Image (cartoon, coloured by chain):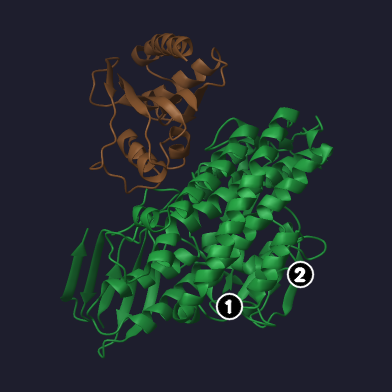
Chain colours: A green, B brown
């Protein structure tokens, strides 16, 4: 049976490749997304003192270190069995939302906009951020500026844009000053203006992608994410909720330390990323999605005015049911940008955020701690066990890209079956297969990646192992 | 518009590669002037274009593998449209200027100050020969800042 390989996939966070299994009639039989990086954090953290875990695991990624700091610190809070000061919770939330803002900006403006605004069939030499600059310079500048705002907030709080070590077990290292708050507040009106402008622009162009919306990962799956006590959008705390593809809540409120009762992990030989699944439904039927699309599908409301208005418009894509197409991750990301700016306004408006008590201190008081937060790409779980001396004896990390692994594979298969016909591979086919992966904004850890015309090695291999066709470019 | 921005870039976990950030961190202890921007960063990223668009002169500080350990070099940086501008997570100073020009229609005057790296293994410590250049760079940058302040 012929096999077609796409490697590497561009404009994603890290390295991956795709293989398409073709039948003799030239139709796609199966598709697999291979995550080809091995990071090994779960192993080499063993033996380290648990307070080091936030700083160690934050190095997993240069794009979302804040997410790892938060989930890890929450796991360490549990190990210490402390309740962290309320101001520390607010400050962690501020940094988490700033991270969400800059990460969503990178995904939408830099990585996905060239496809969305210039089209998958456009000349690859212009289907990149410079083509975007020519087509819509305001949008390109907005992307730069929104990322800069998110990073300025992170840097203002922590002193560093990348790998800030400010979030620590028990809280945060230092309180927010009045000056710092004023600086953050001064950035928010412009951030809101950009978020609203981009949302309006996208609402206008999304109608062009009816075909892609129908086949870009439009498969029935479960959806999972955190919700607050009212069932509203939550990125820092709360309980896990799982909904099915019809919109029924099948898990109402799973605590962090209970996650393994509903989530199990399978290992596939073709990828270094684990394949988590909903345990009661078994593997691989219990596939689910996390991230912006899932979050909007599981919540009652966002809880802020502009985001709630946008949420209603988002839900009109699929009245009465969850929005199923993974193409609409982009839409959901833009709704979350609105939410992030509004919540930052709310959080910084209260004087409680200036409280000087921002850290609880303790030694380890428990042998297991689980921290869960919502990273930009989805639910992030850090599960640690330690010995009585506080040394780490076991680590389990489940990252958003892992949660989405089965759904991404299913999505790639759907797109490949729709667009790839026969062993002859065209640019437009490849671009759409890549683009469906990009909808999930997967993060295989921070690695340099190119955008625009990708270096590509596509091989069509016959069932006898002979190479039927090879396409090289880049 | 800012008179001067100093951007020290490199990986502070890779010995001498952390020279640029080390210089900027030392400089930040001695300079407190709104007209001067100080940026310590692992890599040059596209959003720095917004900073450069609002700056008259930028000085990049970096370590260099092709110079002899501790050797110092300075050169002007131009907006080179032929430079590799395709990477999102890492840009050269030349490519960053291209981004700045294309997005904002202007570029600042730019210089690159380099020191030759001796080792770039896993450590937060600069080697002795490179560490000895930190204060030298800081003093030279302070003189440059003073000159800008007098001219502005």
Label placed on residue A34: none
Left or right of A406: which side holds A69?
right
Q: How many marks?
A: 2
Quarter of the image with the N terminus of chain A is bottom left
Mark 2 — residue?
A300
| Residue at (76, 63) in percent of width and height | A232
Instruction: Decide which of A231, A277 is in the foreground and name it.
Output: A231
From the viewer's perspective, is residue A127 above or below residue A362?
A: below
Left or right of A379: which side holds A267?
left
Regarding residue A282, the answer to whether it shows in the image is yes
Q: Are marks 1 and 2 in contact (CB under 8 Å)?
A: no
Instruction: Decide which of A395, B116 is in the foreground and name it.
Output: B116
Secondary structure type for disc 1: loop
Mark 1 — residue?
A324
From the viewer's perspective, is residue A174 above or below residue A217?
A: above
Task: Place residue A305 in its image quadrant.
Answer: bottom right
The location of residue A355, given as percent across then percent down, is 82, 33
Q: Between marks 1 and 2, how big is the CA–CA gap?
A: 17 Å
Task: Place residue A249 in its image quadrant.
Answer: bottom right
Left or right of A218: which side holds B89?
left
Letter of the chain that mark 2 sits on in the rendering: A
| Residue at (67, 81) in percent of width and height | A321
Mark 1, Cα crowd under 10 Å, few <14 / some 14-19 / many 20+, is many
Letter of the chain that mark 1 sits on in the rendering: A
The location of residue B113, given as percent across then percent down, is 33, 21
| Residue at (23, 25) in percent of width and height | B66
Instruction: Decide which of A71, A323 is in the foreground and name it.
Output: A323
Instruction: Decide which of A140, A39 is in the foreground and name it.
Output: A140
Pointer 1 or 2: first along the chain: 2
């Amino acid at each position: 049976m012929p096999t077609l390989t796409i490697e590497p996939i561009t404009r994603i966070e890290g390295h991956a490749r795709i293989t398409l299994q073709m039948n003799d009639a030239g139709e796609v039989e199966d598709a697999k997304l291979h995550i080809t990086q091995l990071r090994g954090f779960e192993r080499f953290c063993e033996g380290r003192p648990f307070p080091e875990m936030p700083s160690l695991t934050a190095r997993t990624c240069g794009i979302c270190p804040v997410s790892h700091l938060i989930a890890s610190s929450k796991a360490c809070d549990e190990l210490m069995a402390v309740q962290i000061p309320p101001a520390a919770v607010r400050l962690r939330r501020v940094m988490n939302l700033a991270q969400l803002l800059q990460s969503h900006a990178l995904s939408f403006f830099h990585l996905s906009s060239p496809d969305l605004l210039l089209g998958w069939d456009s000349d690859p030499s212009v289907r990149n951020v410079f083509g975007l600059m020519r087509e819509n310079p305001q949008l390109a500048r907005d992307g730069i500026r929104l990322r800069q705002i998110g990073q300025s907030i992170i840097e203002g709080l922590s002193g560093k844009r990348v790998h800030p070590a400010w979030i620590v077990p028990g809280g945060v290292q230092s309180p927010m000053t009045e000056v710092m708050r004023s600086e953050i507040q001064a950035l928010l009106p412009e951030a809101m203006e950009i978020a609203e402008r981009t949302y309006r622009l996208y609402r206008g162009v999304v109608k062009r992608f009816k075909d892609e919306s129908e086949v870009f990962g439009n498969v029935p799956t479960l959806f999972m994410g955190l919700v607050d006590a009212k069932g509203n959008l939550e990125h820092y705390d709360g309980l896990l909720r799982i909904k099915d593809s019809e919109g029924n809540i099948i898990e109402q409120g799973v605590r962090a330390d209970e996650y393994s009762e509903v989530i199990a992990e399978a290992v596939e030989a073709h990828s270094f990323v684990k394949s988590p699944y909903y345990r009661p439904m078994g593997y691989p039927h219990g596939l689910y999605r996390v991230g912006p699309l899932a979050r909007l599908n599981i919540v009652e409301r966002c809880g802020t005015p502009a985001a709630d208005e946008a949420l209603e418009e988002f839900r009109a894509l699929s009245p009465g049911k969850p929005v199923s197409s993974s193409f609409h991750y982009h839409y959901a990301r833009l709704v979350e940008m609105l939410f992030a700016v509004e919540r930052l306004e709310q959080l910084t408006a209260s004087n409680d955020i200036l409280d000087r008590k921002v850290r609880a201190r303790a030694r380890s008081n428990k042998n297991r701690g689980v921290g869960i937060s919502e990273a930009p790409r989805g639910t992030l779980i850090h599960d640690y066990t330690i010995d009585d001396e506080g040394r780490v004896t076991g680590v389990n990390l489940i990252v958003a890209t892992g949660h989405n692994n089965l759904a991404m594979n299913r999505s790639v298969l759907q797109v490949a079956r729709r667009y790839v016909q026969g062993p002859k591979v065209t640019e437009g086919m490849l671009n759409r297969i890549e683009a469906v992966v990009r909808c999930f904004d997967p993060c295989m850890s921070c690695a340099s990646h190119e955008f625009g015309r990708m270096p590509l090695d596509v091989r069509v291999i016959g069932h006898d192992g002979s190479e039927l066709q090879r396409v090289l470019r880049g | 518009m800012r008179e001067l921005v100093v951007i020290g870039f490199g990986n502070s976990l890779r010995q001498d590669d952390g020279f640029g950030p080390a210089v900027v961190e030392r400089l930040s202890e001695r300079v407190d002037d709104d007209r001067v921007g100080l940026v310590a960063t692992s890599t040059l990223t596209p959003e720095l274009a917004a900073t450069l668009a609002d700056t008259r002169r930028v000085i990049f500080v970096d370590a260099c593998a092709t110079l002899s350990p501790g050797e110092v070099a300075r050169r002007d940086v131009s907006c080179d449209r032929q430079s590799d501008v395709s990477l999102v997570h890492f840009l050269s100073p030349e490519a960053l200027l291209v981004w700045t020009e294309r997005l904002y229609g202007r570029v600042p005057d730019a210089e690159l100050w380099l020191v030759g790296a001796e080792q770039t293994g896993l450590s937060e410590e600069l080697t002795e020969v490179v560490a000895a250049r930190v204060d030298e760079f800081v003093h030279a940058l302070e003189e440059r800042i003073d000159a800008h302040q007098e001219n502005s």
